[in-house]
Image (spheres, rainbow, N blue to C red):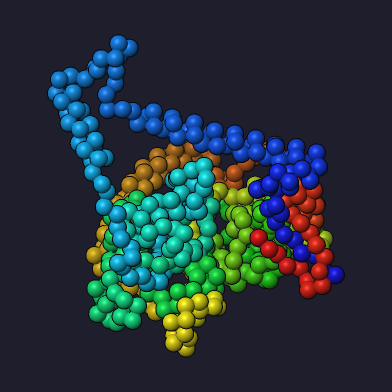
Amino acid sequence: MSVKIQINRNLKDLTRDDLEKLSKAELIDKIIRLQSYNKQLRNILHKKLNEDDQNGDLIKLTESGESKSSGNETTAINHTIKSNISQENMPSRKFDFNKTFKRHVLLKFLYFGWDYQGFACQEDSNNTIEFHLFKALTRTCLIESRSSANYQRCGRTDKEVSAFCQVISIDLRSKYAEEQQFDEDCLANEIDYCGLLNRVLPKNIQCISWMPIRNYSYSARFDCMTRTYRYFFPEGGLNIAAMQEACKLLQRHTDFRNLCKMDVNNGVTNYVRHIEEANIHLCSHENESISKGYTMHYLEIKANAFLWHQIRCIMAVLLLIGHGKEEPSVINELLNVEKNPCKPQYTPAMGFPLNLYHCEFRDKSEQKILNPSQQEIEDLPDLTKWLHNEYNLRRLVENLQSEWSQAQIKATMIRSILYDLEQLLKKEFNVFDINWQSSLLQDGIKSKHYQKLMNRKRCESLKNRIEHFVKKQRLTVTKQEDGLKEEQ
């Protein structure tokens, strides 16, 4: 006998009759949640009003109501106001999507996430990758709206996390009818999707290439077979060999609840994942024999899917192993959930060195073909090939070289003064080998006396968390015969 765990959403929109059936405790819980939601809305509104105030009006008035602007400024302002009024009175011409064709594509993006609040759209912030992406898609009239765009994303990266290979599936406006869309001439003369988007996207979010897809049901999320992430870090006195030994212990199909942040509140109760590869590599442009403490490495980890903060938690433990505070065998202890059902308390590694580096997709979608007119493509592969534009790639390389130059100049200046200070320490105090380069990756309070992971205070077990949210009526648990299932 197993259980079925389901998110309980019944308390969100209730009629008067439903509310009368609730107990006093249930009504109090609902009122508290509504008060919290209202407070959040007030904060969002207050933030928005403050932003509008900071933008300011064109004319600043004195207490008497007179303008402080000079004569020339007043003339210019009046002209701007008149032009704005005339533009508002003019009827805006709306793009007619009924007169256009659509095609299903994959779009590949890169972005640097350290200035953003994550990839996915959020209710309380517009500072996300997805917000800027859909703003560009609608501004260029490539889609009418998100809801009608048949949109799926490959990965949902967290705050500060970057991506060199973020892929989305989406229906975009096309020049050609469906029966012509895969002709070589039509592909060569199709809308320049990447060039069009890159002109309106921020410089640190750019489209690399696009791929025409035969099956409109093909999903960048569900038809992605593996995702590869890289976490970059300086050597900084770390024992790379011990970290590589620990990586081998990660390569298995097992429960990673002690190496992630559990998201039981959203109905995630299955923490079994399959890590295909995990290893530490020297960056290709680095020379290991020079400035060893400053040599850059990266953890490369490949799996079918990942849990919330899974790689950052893995990296946090690997850093402890690299610093000699833990043995590589601690990985086995953390992955033995029968012996250790409760996660020891530790802080995940910083998010900004992490990036989604590569994604692999299956040739044929596992999703059902919904459009009867597409049954003829059932025997053909859904994937075709990535289409690139030389001019767009050249512009992208030029922009990234400019970003690199600025960052490298700053790094070189800091490295130069570090060299002088290190030499001074050796000369004056005979101090050698200070390697704190990797210390910033371990966030949180650093205690004077290190306590072993398995001796630390433990978090709640998965069972206790499920019981907690069942009491809060966020989850519903029912017994069933078919085995454990999860619904969101």
Q: In x, y percent, where is residue 361? A: 49, 74
Please count the marks in the image: 0
Q: Is residue 365 visible?
A: no
Judged left or right of residue 404, residue 6 is: right
The quadrant of the image that shows the C terminus is bottom right
Q: Residue at x 36, y 55 (%)?
A: 138
Residue 481 point in image, percent of width and height: 82, 72
User: In the rendered image, which quarter contains the N terminus?
Assistant: bottom right
In the depicted structure, whether residue 398 falls above or below residue 53: below
248 or 414: nearer the viewer: 248
Image position of 183 with respect to 445: above or below = below
Which residue corresponds to the image point at 49% horizontal and 51% vertical from the top-left?
121
Residue 116 against residue 389 in the figure, above or below: above
Q: Nearer the viewer, residue 158 or 149?
A: 149
| The residue positioned farthest toward the right in the image shown | 1
> Who's the residue at 77% across and 54% down the image?
466
- Say which quarter of the image contains residue 313: bottom right
State the image quarter where residue 78 is shown.
top left
Image location (x, y in percent) of residue 241: 60, 63
Q: Residue 386: in sight, yes or no?
A: yes
Q: Image height check: is 425 above or below 238?
A: above
Residue 149, given in percent of the width and then of the height, sits at 43, 63
